[in-house]
Image: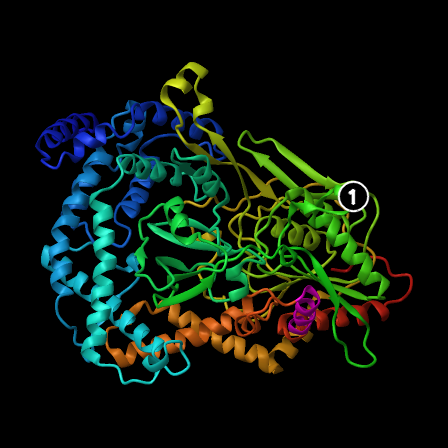
Amino acid sequence: MTKTTRILCIATFVAVLAFLVSSGLAADLDRSYTHPEIMANILRQQLENNHYSKKKFDDDLSKAAFQMYLKQLDPLKMFLLTADVERLKAYEDLIDDEMKSGKFELSTLGAEILVRRVKEVEPSMREALSRDFDFSLKEYVETDPEKRSYCATEDELKERWRKILKYQVLNRYLGILDERKPGKEGGEQDVRTPDPGETQKQAREKVLKTYETLFSRMVKEKKTEPFDRYFRAVTKAFDPHTEFLPPATKEDFDIHMKGTLEGIGATLREDDGYIKVESIVPGGPAYLQGGLQANDRITKVAEADSDPVDIVGMRVSDAVRLIRGKKGSVVSLTVLRPNGVESVLSITRDVVQIEETFAKSTILKRAEGTVPIGYLYLPSFYRDFGAGAGGDSRSSADDVRVEIKKLQAEGIKGLVVDLRGNGGGALSDAINIAGAFIKEGPVVQVKNGRGRVTVLADTEGRYKYDGPLAILVNRYSASASEILAGALQDYGRAVIIGGDHTYGKGTVQSVISLSDSMPPWQRAQHGDLGALKLTIQKFYRITGESTQHKGVVPDIALPDMLEDARSGERYLDYALPWDTIAPAGFEKWDKDRISLGSLTERSSGRVHSAGDFETIAAESKKYGEQQKNTLQPLNIDELRRERDEAKRLRDKLARSLKSRIESEHQKDEPRRISPEERYKKWVAEVNEDPYVREAAAVLADMIAQILAQPADVSSSGR
């Protein structure tokens, strides 16, 4: 059968389907947008003409979009059968045709199948939760949807649901027991012996209520959602940062653009049906609490002691409404860790502590007879956070210069700049900060979709600091952080220290209003069509290598708790590839001769003899094993051990990643400590950080090498 014949056959089938669906779903979907073909036409033109990749709407793009559509339709593979997927596969190479014709049969059919399966699964769900589970049995459940296949039969699907529900109830059961441990709030409840039957009944009732809410929402899906899901799949097929933002109020539109979980301080994105944490906002409640981490998937949200609401499959804007709340109130988040273990975190909502988002510095402790080393922490490349002296806006570049001047006044002989966890920000500030460490020259190259390359350079012509320099990075150093670290590495100006690579985001996005693409008279007629976040440019280092995908590889690698974490651009669907362009003309640093091989050898010797790094390496191995082992036990003793070990590793990871704030003190000490007290605690924690200590040791080795050089040596030797 030819593609054209299949289009005609499918169109006929869907027309009959629309007539037969007694629920009226198909008829409702036809009215979900007044003119969805107009939106499709605008989206197609914007994507084809302005996306960096210049991909065309063809069969290859259609197949990619179809895979994204399936992930969004049933991300956990808990509803569709293989027969359903086969029916939908008839559209696998037709999405490009639908986007051109404005006839969206796939969205209608997919929504109809999903609602029907939800209604069929619901009785099985209720039946499974109507009786006690046997937690003594040795059985397991696969928690990673990527490792699951679609069920072939309804009986197989029923069994999958039984295991998932048992896993949810067992986790809730253990959570209730944890709440009743001595020391928890609750008075007499803390010390009484819980009744297993009553406790499991309570757990089953809570899980049932959660799924009742979820199923109700799914069968009463908003009329716009099938089209929104369809258009999101199409845009995600271009690259992971290109996204259709559905029509919404101005508040929700802003939330989409910022990706901010207001009230707890975290950035998020939709990922295969989950609300996934992308990063933690410095100074926010989650940042201070220390439990929530990047790559965590939030599955449920509860207000204080109320029952949780399942947010799997929910849009970011809807999830935000549940997470937001008054300052001082508590929100409980059920979080699925990368290894499949569930945790419940309680976070007190608050405003971001702005002072924690700014650059700050200190002189590191040193042994007698050693030289002073400065430390500068930069959590983000911020700009316009608030008014500074004289009413001027505050920027990270200005603050870094102020901190460098303070450190130089203290007589530092070396400087550590910490970019760990810095997800980027203002490109101009990254360029200006690079200019503080080089005399002048190019910092980054930017290429647009038409192939035009622009070289962005520092032209100030003078240094702010020209001494030995080390840059600390990790997996969550991204975007502008990678530009700064990459440029200073390429110049030979700094030694980059960290794990095996940085995040690898080397693309630039722009947000386009779809309504603005129409003439004014049409805009008034059709209203808000939403927006499109579009990848329009790509970053390149001055050597011509992209920062995309690979990130920046440190000169000196240290053991990393995140070594096996699937964190970074390389793990995202349809991420743009690494490539190269012509290098920009630049002169290498020629002030000091540094033997990188000698520095690496000495660092390796210290790391292998240091207890801290031995512990980190061992914990990293355990964490990696946990991540790979997504087959979770349904036996109470085994799962309790898994949860306890996961909590121990999570706490250790939180201490490794959090921003040098003593969050445990914050939880134990309810009063708001003064900025001076907070700074003292920050300084103490910095000096206990093994990565900072090793960076300082590397700088000490660099200084020793420089002092041993003949006075007339001027070539870099790197």
Q: Nearer the viewer, residue 705 or 560?
A: 560
Task: Tell me if residue 106 is in the magenta stretch.
Answer: no
Above or below — where is 598 with respect to 454? below
Q: Pick the residue in front: 450 or 189.
A: 189
The residue lying at 85 percent from left, 66 percent from top is 411
Whole-percent x, y for residue 419 in the image = 63, 58
Residue shown at the point (59%, 42%) measured from the top left: 539
Residue 149 shows in the view: no
As drawn, the residue found furthest toward the front would be 187
Circle 1 is placed at which residue position? Answer: 390
Residue 360, placed above or below residue 270: below
Disc 1 residue type? Answer: Gly
Q: State the extent of the magenta-drawn residues as a range.
A: 674-686
Q: Quadrant of the N terminus?
A: top left
Q: Is residue 522 left or right of residue 561?
A: left
Which element carries disc 1, helix, strand or loop? helix
Q: Is residue 572 above or below residue 100?
A: below
Q: In the image, is residue 139 above or below residue 24?
A: below
Quadrant of the rendered structure where residue 672 is? bottom right
* Residue nearest the viewer, comparing 410 with 146: 410
Give residue 135's position: percent from left, percent from top: 20, 77
Examine the structure image and report whether residue 678 is included in the region drawn in magenta: yes
Residue 332 screen position, x and y as percent: 39, 62
